[in-house]
Image (cartoon, helix red, strand yellow):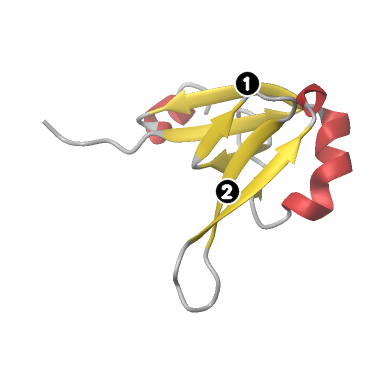
Amino acid sequence: MSKRRRQTSVFLTEPGRLELAMLLTPWLRVGAPIGPYVECRKVDLEGEYAELVLAFEPADDESVDVRLSVPHHVVAAVLEVTDHEAFGALYSG
């Protein structure tokens, strides 16, 4: 049995995407058949704000976690999958 890495994608509302675009530039993925999203290591929706844990890899290739808290109203959906390519194939036409 192969181990699959769980991928969590956060889809933002259009106003939220525009409002946070400058801040999310390194992580925002656009042009995907399922819409623009932010790939996260972890998402916590339980608090006053939605907390996104994002991976940042500076030039020295050492990954650093970045925690970003955003208002709940900018989050349209959270998608968790273990096989992102297979899921994306559903929307590829």
- Image x and y of residue 85, in percent: 40, 35
How many residues crowd around disc 1 within 10 Å: few (fewer than 14), some, or many (20 or more)? few
Name the residue furthest left.
1
Give the amino acid at mark 1.
Glu
Q: Position of residue 22 (x, y in %)?
A: 82, 54
Horizontal side of 41 relative to 21 (left or right) equals left
Determine the residue located farthest toward the front in the rendered image. 47
Callout 2, which amino acid?
A: Leu
At horizontal 69% and vertical 45% (from top left) the residue drawn is 68
Q: Position of residue 57 (x, y in %)?
A: 52, 65
Q: Left or right: where does residue 23 sit relative to residue 87?
A: right
Label 1 sits on residue: 46
Q: Counting other residues with Cα less than 10 Å from the Cα at mark 2, is it few (<14), some (14-19), or many (20 or more)?
A: many
Does residue 22 lie above or below 13 as drawn?
Answer: below
Q: Quadrant of the N terminus?
A: top left
Image quadrant where residue 35 sits: top right
Residue lying at 72% horizontally and 39% vertically, measured from the top left: 69
For label 2, the residue is: 54
The residue positioned 83% from the left and 33% from the top of the image is 16
Foreground label between 1 and 2:
1
Mark 1–mark 2 Cα distance, whole angstroms, equals: 17 Å
Q: Earlier in the sequence, mark 1 or mark 2?
A: 1
Question: 87 above or below 19?
Answer: above
Q: Quick one: SS at disc 1?
A: loop
Residue 21 x, y percent position in the rendering: 81, 48
Q: Residue 29: in sight, yes or no?
A: no
Considering every residue shown, the one lying at the far bottom of the view is: 60
Q: Secondary structure at mark 2?
A: strand
